[in-house]
Image (cartoon, rainbow, N blue to C red):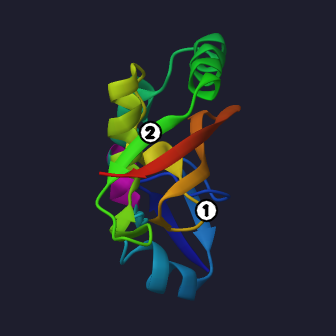
Amino acid sequence: MAKLILTHEVTGLGEPGDVVEVKDGYARNFLVPRKLATPWSKGAESQVTAIRKARKAREIASLDDAKAIRDSLQSKPVVVEAKAGAAGRLFGAVTTADIASAVTAAGASVDKRKIEIGQPIKATGDYTVSVRLHPEVSATLAVKVVAA
């Protein structure tokens, strides 16, 4: 078992700043190469406190605020424009950054790291993505991809 400090949120594992124990292969092949975690050491406690302090500053203050943002996000679909071919197939894919900028243009603010896309979006149409607003609140966001 490998002991790691998470630097980014990993669904089902923990938040940034958490110290977790995972199997060696998961740490060596997935978490560390993608910079989602760093190896734990005794001297890394200051790093853990810095990560937790930054997380608290970014986190939405209260549960009521998160629920209000969730209601505003779920009220209407977000339109994302992307270059597409004749058959509706995209040149590339819609990323979390594209969705976050479309949400910002619509009047709300969402961190791209909090958006989870189930399947890669590579064609025009309607899709559903999940947005984690708070540890207890997540929103289902309707995304409409149109050709630019």
Q: Where are the magenta residues, as a range?
A: 42-46
Closer to the observer: label 2 or label 1? Answer: 2
**Is the Cβ of the residue at disc 2 closer than 8 Å to that at disc 1?**
no
The residue that label 2 is drawn on is 79
- Secondary structure, mark 1, is loop
Residue 19 spot, x, y in % from top left: 54, 56
Counting labels gives 2
| Front residue of 86 and 6 | 86
Relative to 44, is 114 on the left or the right? right
Q: Quadrant of residue 41?
A: bottom left
CA neighbours of label 1 inside 10 A, class few (<14), some (14 to 19), many (20+): few
Q: CA distance from mark 2 to mark 1?
A: 18 Å
Residue 11 spot, x, y in % from top left: 61, 56
Point out which mark residue 118 bears.
Answer: 1
Q: Is residue 44 magenta?
A: yes
Looking at the rendered structure, the kind of residue marked 2 is Val
